[in-house]
Image (tube, rainbow, N blue to C red):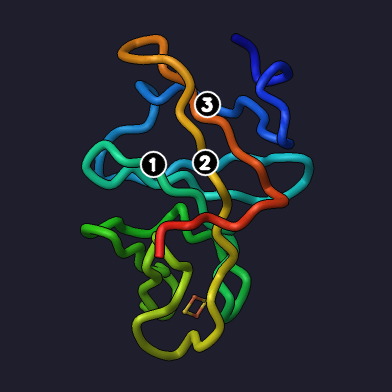
């Protein structure tokens, strides 16, 4: 099955096997900067640009469900996009993700027009 046949605006952006657990990976989807974060095998997608001063969050450290902005240290929950502490006060966008296929063949699909529903 290809991304095109899945409909609903989802597009194929990465192989799951290329996203190591505990890391964030930058991808550009139609000009939108996205950080794909692998938390113990579950993939989350957030906007890659810190809401505080516009640096790349995917260059920061991942710890559990949090990603730390390397510039001033705010941490964001990748499930909700919410910062857990200052200086950032605004959340970053989250995006709906689907996994298509299994094992080595599994692919990550994203719909950048749909928010994630990770709660
Ligand atoms: S730029 Fe991210 S916390 Fe300041």
- Residue found 25% across the figure and 38% down from its top: 21
In terms of sequence position, does the residue under pointer 1 or pointer 2 come before the other?
1
Q: Which numbered marker is on residue 97?
A: 2
Q: How far is disc 3 from disc 1 in space, using C-alphas?
A: 11 Å
State the residue in front, 87 or 66: 66
Q: Secondary structure at mark 3?
A: strand
Asked if residue 100 lies left or right of residue 68, the reply is: right
Ligand 1 within 8 Å of the CB at mark 1: no
- Residue found 41% across the figure and 17% down from its top: 106
Q: Secondary structure at mark 2?
A: strand
Q: Which numbered marker is on residue 14?
A: 3
- Residue found 57% across the figure and 52% down from its top: 95
Quadrant holding the N terminus: top right
Location of residue 59 (image quadrant): bottom left
In terms of sequence position, does the residue under pointer 2 or pointer 3 come before the other?
3
Tag 1 residue: 43
Q: Secondary structure at mark 1?
A: strand
């Amino acid at each position: 099955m290809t991304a095109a046949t899945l409909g609903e605006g989802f597009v194929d952006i990465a192989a799951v096997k290329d996203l190591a657990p505990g890391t964030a990976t930058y991808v550009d989807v139609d000009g939108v900067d996205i950080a794909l974060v692998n938390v113990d095998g579950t993939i989350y997608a957030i906007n890659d640009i810190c809401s505080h001063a516009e640096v790349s969050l995917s260059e920061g450290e991942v710890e559990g469900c949090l990603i730390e902005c390397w510039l001033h240290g705010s941490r964001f929950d990748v499930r909700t996009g919410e910062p857990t502490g200052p200086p950032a006060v605004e959340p970053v966008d989250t995006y709906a993700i689907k996994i298509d296929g299994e094992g080595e063949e599994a692919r990550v699909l994203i719909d950048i027009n749909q928010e994630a529903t990770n709660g």
